[in-house]
Image (tube, coloured by chain):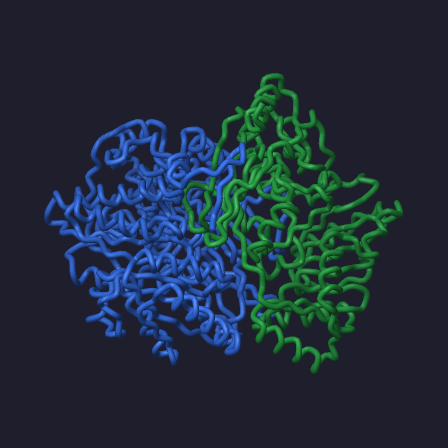
Chain colours: A green, B blue
Amino acid sequence: MESLAWLKQRVLDAAQHQIPLRLRGSGSKDFYGEMARGDLLDVSVHQGILRYEPTELVVTAKAGTPLALLEQTLAECRQMLAFEPPHFGAKATVGGMVAAGLSGPRRAASGAVRDFVLGMSLLDSKAELLRFGGEVMKNVAGYDLSRLNVGALGTLGLIVEVSLKVWPMPAASETLWIAMDAANAIEHLNRWAAEPWPLSASAWVDGHLILRLEGAQAAVSEAANRWQRDYQAKFLTADQARQFWDDLKEQRLAFFGAVRQSSKALWRLSLPSASAHQPSWGDTVIEWGGALRWVLCSNDDASIREQVRAIGGHASLFRSLDKRHPVFTPLAPAMMALQRRIKREFDPLGIFNPGRLMPSLDVNA
Amino acid sequence: MSYRMNESNGIETPAAALQAESRLPHAQVGHVLEPQQSDVAKPASPARKAQVARELARLLPEGAVLWRDEDLRPYECDGLTAFRQMPMVVVLPLNEAQVIEVLRCCYRLEVPVVARGAGTGLSGGAMPHASGVVLSLARLNRILHLDPHARLARVQPGVRNLAISEAVAGFGLYYAPDPSSQIACTIGGNIAENSGGVHCLKYGLTLHNVLRVRAISMDGEVLEFGSEALDSPGLDVLAALIGSEGMLAVVTEVTVRLIPKPQLARVVMASFDDVIKAGEAVAMIIAEGIIPAGLEMMDQKTAEAVEPFVQAGYDLKAQAILLAESDGTPQEVAEEIARIEAVLAKAGATAMKVSQSEAERLRFWSGRKNAFPAAGRISPDYYCMDGTIPRKHLGNMLRDIAAMETSYALRCMNVFHAGDGNLHPLILFDANDPDQWRRAELFGADILERCVGYGGTVTGEHGVGIEKINSMCVQFSPAERAAFFALKRAFDPLGLLNPGKAIPTLARCAEYGKMHVHAGAVPYPNLERF
């Protein structure tokens, strides 16, 4: 049976018998979010790049398409997904990337997954195929339901097709590092962000501030020379640079390995970029010009969540062997009530990944 | 070179693919849909109007509640004066607390509410409801907090778009989205329409430049969408709110992202003797991996209309004129301009000029920016359209529009945000001739339906409002429109916020007939409009 027809049938069956579905591409993001439950629906069968127009800056692919294949196809035309999504698994799919809504090192400079989603097709709870957005960026017809589904972890419908805005690869790229403590790094990153530097990514790891410059050759060279002169910055080779940013994006750096020891949990802090560094939270890696901080703390300590909320951010329990705390920061009551109503409108039977995003969003919660 | 793959890995022909993409079966091309009688709101009784005015006057200071006809008249339309409706009452609260009180009162009395910023919208989104309240946010016009280190500005919804950039210019920062009406339009209105502007190809839409919106639901609850962090937990409701045309919640505060002002900007002006070549040139620029800061096109009719006005030195023999802007550091700009010139030469540009000074750059842009007032010079009235198509169809679309000029016996000037395929055909007509009105409106609907046929959308940036609500029947299926209503119900179950706008009901879409449009002059004629 043709894959879309099969997916429709599975959704219809689930709706008829009110049996929840666990939507899954390749399982690369299984670790992320709350526990999934329901009958497994393997969306990876529905794959293929449908349309790719380099001169239109758009690619449309079925949700089960391997992300690696998509990125390779774009690279052949010297284009890329500007938001540099982490795969977290060799068979990561396009649908999983969009449903998880996780962006990589270039996010602060270029935008997030959601900013590059131009449109998507979804199966709703009646297995009807709905198409929102389109293949053009300038499109304000109707509510932005395709972007509402980005990062929703499949809780509002089954994504079957996505159209993404693509971006040209930069002409030049250089990575350099500067010895600096965290507080100074945050200060400098915020200062540089207000100046016209071609800074596409940054990472502070263990006393080192690593910076990636991308753009026109002249601009990159000038910036690199300035930093070398003013901060004694050292350069990485092209291979070292590629490896480093990939290891950071995929969380293969030694820092991230600590979660495998069961006493540590990896928290993801999303906060205002100039927020002060707090060594008391735990070992930290800083990205996104200060707006993203990875923190290792002991498993049963959730006080970090309150502290981050108090400074205008939110902390998610990103990876932990012991998930006794809610993964995501609870919403304010009025916002929670609104999001529950949205969930109820789009998934009245509770068949789409119940409990995956926030258990309290569910119809039966 | 684009390719398509179907399930069996065959290659579809472009023609077959275009047909497959077409949504036209939902409506008849050439028939224009009429509002149902039940869609047209009736004015309230004098008793009801008095009751509502009295209750609102209790909550607001002296002068903040208007009910006399002469005081209501300035609010009867927005920038699309074809659609006028006197409201029942207009309120002008001074702060968020008063906005909350107004909404609670209207919720209790079940009075429809239409929010309004500067009223510069071009799709009738702020057109009043006959038995409703216009809630003006104009007095919430303070810049609350600037944080140049974190590159944020927190402002009230009535703050003008350009005022934000002006306030932070001293820090070397600016707010990037630059809709043409930016000297007058408000950031709250920009949120409602997800406004773009010339520079959105490179710098994004409102959506990409807003971090947080504080808004009030129809029943008076305060909702915080987003935050000063780069993301928030839960569903991305901020994305759903932006572009929701005042139908989901009323904005009382916005936190926008500021970026460094480019050191330099220069423009290349290129002439083409053929619109197809000009369209291809646009595609070639993108194919080269260049994302210009601005990439705009105007046709010969437009150039002829504006040149006597602005004396920018436009090539009046050119079938199309392309303006490509590069911004950044001097080295970045030099490198990019050289690459752009090389591409345009290869694309067959018959002439090219690069601005040598800021004054010259502004002069090159002046014709494009003055296209609308120039239309007013050569025609008693004009009807500005707003649609988007994939860039590659620009040449075809221009040819289609030329054919429509003949069949509708009306002239049409064309200006485009060529970089993102967003077109603004300006249909020229004389409103004193009723038959010209009728033909202009049919011409417009034909253009929009053609946009959908080419895989685009009926509105790139002006919003649906009341103007294009019928075209939504062409672009979306009944199930998709039902999904829009589902979101609406979650936010506003009583349907009191800006009812009758943007999303058409099944009943409306099911009707066929002729719609009479009475188009007139555009207010704020001095405003630049793209």
> As drawn, which residue projects farthest toward the left?
B433
Rendered image quadrant of residue A243:
bottom right
Task: Write the residue at 54% across / 30% down.
Answer: A123
Task: Write the residue at 35% across / 35% down.
Answer: B474
Task: Write the residue at 59% across / 69% down.
Answer: A198
Q: Nearer the viewer, residue B169 or A95?
A: A95
> As drawn, which residue projects farthest toward the top?
A17
**Vertical position of residue A292 compared to residue B39: above or below:** below
Q: Nearer the viewer, residue A364 or B133?
A: A364
Q: Where residue A359 sits in the image (x, y, percent)?
A: 68, 34
> As drawn, which residue projects farthest toward the front?
B10
Q: Where residue B157 sits in the image (x, y, percent)?
A: 45, 56
**Image quarter hosting the C terminus of chain B:** bottom left
Q: Is residue B365 left or right of A359 when viewed as pictured?
A: left
Q: Is residue B356 left or right of B429 when viewed as pictured?
A: right
**Vertical position of residue A123 compared to residue A165: above or below:** above
Q: Is residue A236 left or right of B69 when viewed as pictured?
A: right
Q: Where residue A322 sits in the image (x, y, percent)?
A: 83, 40
Q: Is residue B233 among what the camera can see?
A: no
**Vertical position of residue B186 compared to residue A300: above or below:** below
Q: Nearer the viewer, residue A309 or A84?
A: A84
Q: Is residue B404 among what the camera can see?
A: yes
Rendered image quadrant of residue A240:
bottom right
Q: Where residue A119 sits in the image (x, y, percent)?
A: 50, 43
Count of numbered circles on the image: 0
Q: Nearer the viewer, residue B42 or B480?
A: B480
**Vertical position of residue A306 compared to residue B284: above or below:** above
